[in-house]
Image (cartoon, helix red, strand yellow):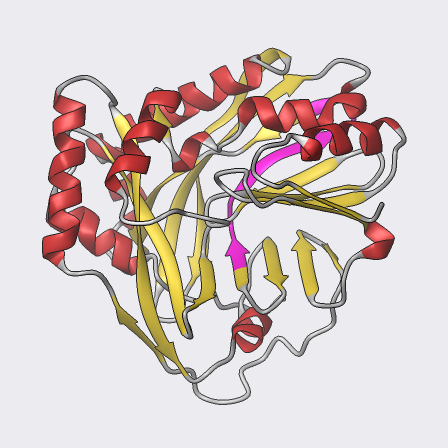
Amino acid sequence: MSEVKNNNKSLDWVLQMNQMGSERLPFIFILDYELNDTHIFKIDQIPNDIYYKFNDIKNYQLRGIKSKPLIFDKNPISEHIYKKAFLKLKSEIYFGNTFLANLTFPTEIETNYTLKELFDISHAKYKLYFKNKFIVSSPETFIQIKNGKVFTFPMKGTIDASIKDAANVILSDVKETAEHYTIVDLLRNDLSMIATQVVVNRFRYIDELKTTTNTLLQVSSEIEGTLSDDYACHLGDIFKTILPAGSITGAPKPKTQSIINEIEIDKRGYYTGVFGIFDGQNVDSAVMIRFIEQKNNKMIYRSGCGITHMSEMDTEYKEMIDKVYVPLGRKH
């Protein structure tokens, strides 16, 4: 069987990943946020309308250059709609039901590029083009498995690089620091459910990302754990245990997921799900952010921000809009 598609009530994708892992069969997997519409493909049987890139591994050859000046206009939700959700989430925080929640919204975009053309010009460590339905240009690793070690790289904290002394500003920001501590603690706990000897190797380092309008600095950390010798036989179980990604839900995770489902105005679908590749030995995977989908003859970009008790509505609303961009660069 070249593909297993979950039908909303089964966990076939878990069993299939376990089986293919135990047989050391290379495959890619695409798991939506709700785990209602999952796909697994053997590496030699991937449809020709799916393109992927996992760092230096990719299955496409595109030009990677702009063929015309890029028009990219944003039509975000109103401040009124955002404020209503923001205040409701803040009340949940004040009642102690969550202390960090990632609040996301769709933004309609108008562009003179097709979905495939946007995929072509985008630059990211992880990219996915799925059947002219959506594209991903993600900077965020979910987990990597290398020689029996599992790594995750939580990403929290974004700032415009043009701001004076931007790196020090973001690293010394009290709200951003507290949010990053929370996510690192959450993901360290997640890894502890599947691995032993979990340690934080690097804490709050900075990556630079070029966008359609500016350059952003993003703050990440690196966490490592040791898997059992037979980890490949349990790949599905590993992902089932730690999904969804803590960086795009919040803490405590189960309760925060429930709050998100009530407050956000629509289902996330593939946005903030994960996709990855197993090469027969190791795994690389990414969180599906920097996400554009075709929906009802419109192009929709999804973005969001982490909300804590220190968050201010105007700042978070602006950050949500600032995260609507096409990441540009030389390598594709």
State the quadrant of the N terminus: top right
Measuring from the top left, give residue 312's x and y in whole percent: 12, 41
| Residue name at image x 27 percent, y 36 percent | 262
- Residue at image point 70% right, 23% down: 149
Q: Position of residue 322 (x, y in %)?
A: 29, 59
Front in this rendered view, residue 86 or 168: 86
Is residue 296 in view from this perspective? yes
Q: Which residues are magenta?
A: 136-149
Q: In the image, what residue occupies the spot 51% across and 44% down?
A: 140
Q: Position of residue 163 (x, y in %)?
A: 24, 56
Q: Residue at x 69, y 28 (%)?
A: 236
- Say if the magenta span includes residue 140: yes
Number of disc labels: 0
Report which quarter residue 167 is drawn in.
top left
User: In the picture shown, does residue 253 fall above or below 209?
Assistant: above
* Residue 328 appears left or right of 149: left
In this rendering, the answer to whether 331 lies above or below 303 is below
Q: Is residue 325 in the magenta section?
A: no
Q: Quadrant of the C terminus?
A: bottom right
**Residue with the most extreme bottom position:** 68
Q: Residue furthest right?
A: 23
Q: Is residue 296 above or below residue 257?
A: below
Tell me the quarter of the picture where residue 276 sits: top right
Q: Position of residue 107 (x, y in %)?
A: 31, 62
